[in-house]
């Protein structure tokens, strides 16, 4: 971004991805592999440990039930509602045991975003703000550097703006403790198929708003078109 403010982007959240299909593959006597095919063509694999060999017909039965009940549902919804969705499945014997494993471990098995949580926040160089009067004090500059290093608070802040239409602007105390005082955050959503992310800039409250808003709007549209 050609601006004196700090560019920022948040990658799409996999929670919003819709499950198209899942397959259960036997790898060994006590290990299975869950293959998740997601809308848009992405594929994720998860390994499952089981106690003792489970019959092929039980694997097939559980796979059928899970596809019937979970197909077309987002991963985020599956993680919190799998138990309720399969409660009256009617499976018996070993199939029941395996289905219980899925219910007990639903948060881990369908949390494919866990490895991406770092938190897919991309930041420009904080040094572009070093000469701003707002950062004349060492404490303010230290706070900004800490933010760019940990990024966790910033990721949480950006997640609250995800899937919001148009440009969003928050100033000063509206950020809580997520940003140093005297800062403004300007963001807009971009789309990547069925997913969405956030792109924008951080800068002092005296930033040239008209220029920044135009730049953020144009960039979000461009990124959406490139990812279409």
Image (tube, helix red, strand yellow):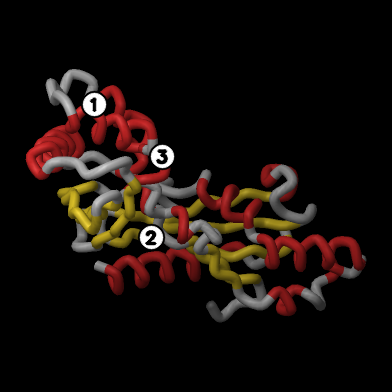
- Residue 85 — which label? 1
- Residue 107 — which label? 3
Badge 2 is on which residue?
190
- Mark 3 to mark 2 CA distance (whole Å): 27 Å
Percent position of residue 59, x then y: 14, 42
Local secondary structure at mark 3: helix
Residue at 26 percent of width and 54 percent of height: 33
Local secondary structure at mark 2: strand
Quarter of the image where the C terminus is located: bottom left
Percent position of residue 217, x then y: 44, 64
Percent position of residue 135, x then y: 84, 67
Q: Earlier in the sequence, mark 2 or mark 1?
A: 1
Query: On the rendered structure, is 158 left or right of 97?
Result: right
* Residue 186 placement: quadrant: bottom right
Residue 144 or residue 114, whichever sits in front: 114
Local secondary structure at mark 1: helix
Residue at 52 percent of width and 44 percent of height: 160
């Amino acid at each position: 971004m050609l601006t004196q403010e700090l560019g920022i982007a948040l990658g799409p959240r996999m929670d919003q991805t819709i499950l198209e299909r899942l397959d259960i593959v036997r790898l060994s006597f006590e290990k299975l592999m869950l293959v998740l095919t997601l809308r848009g063509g992405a594929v994720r694999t998860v390994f499952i440990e089981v106690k003792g060999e489970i019959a092929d017909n039980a694997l097939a039965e559980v796979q059928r039930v899970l596809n019937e009940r979970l197909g077309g549902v987002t991963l985020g919804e599956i993680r919190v509602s799998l138990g309720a969705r399969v409660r009256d499945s009617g499976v018996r014997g070993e199939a029941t045991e395996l289905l219980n494993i899925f219910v007990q471990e639903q948060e881990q098995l369908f949390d494919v975003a866990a490895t991406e949580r770092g938190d897919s926040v991309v930041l420009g160089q904080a040094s572009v703000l070093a000469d701003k009067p707002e950062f004349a004090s060492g404490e303010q500059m230290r706070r900004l550097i800490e933010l760019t290093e940990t990024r966790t608070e910033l990721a949480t802040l950006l997640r609250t703006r995800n899937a919001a239409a148009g440009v969003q602007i928050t100033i000063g105390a509206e950020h809580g403790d997520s940003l140093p005082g005297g800062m403004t955050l300007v963001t807009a959503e971009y789309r990547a198929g069925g997913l969405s992310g956030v792109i924008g800039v951080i800068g002092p409250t005296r930033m040239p708003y008209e220029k920044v808003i135009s730049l953020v709007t144009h960039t979000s549209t461009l990124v959406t078109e490139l990812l279409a």
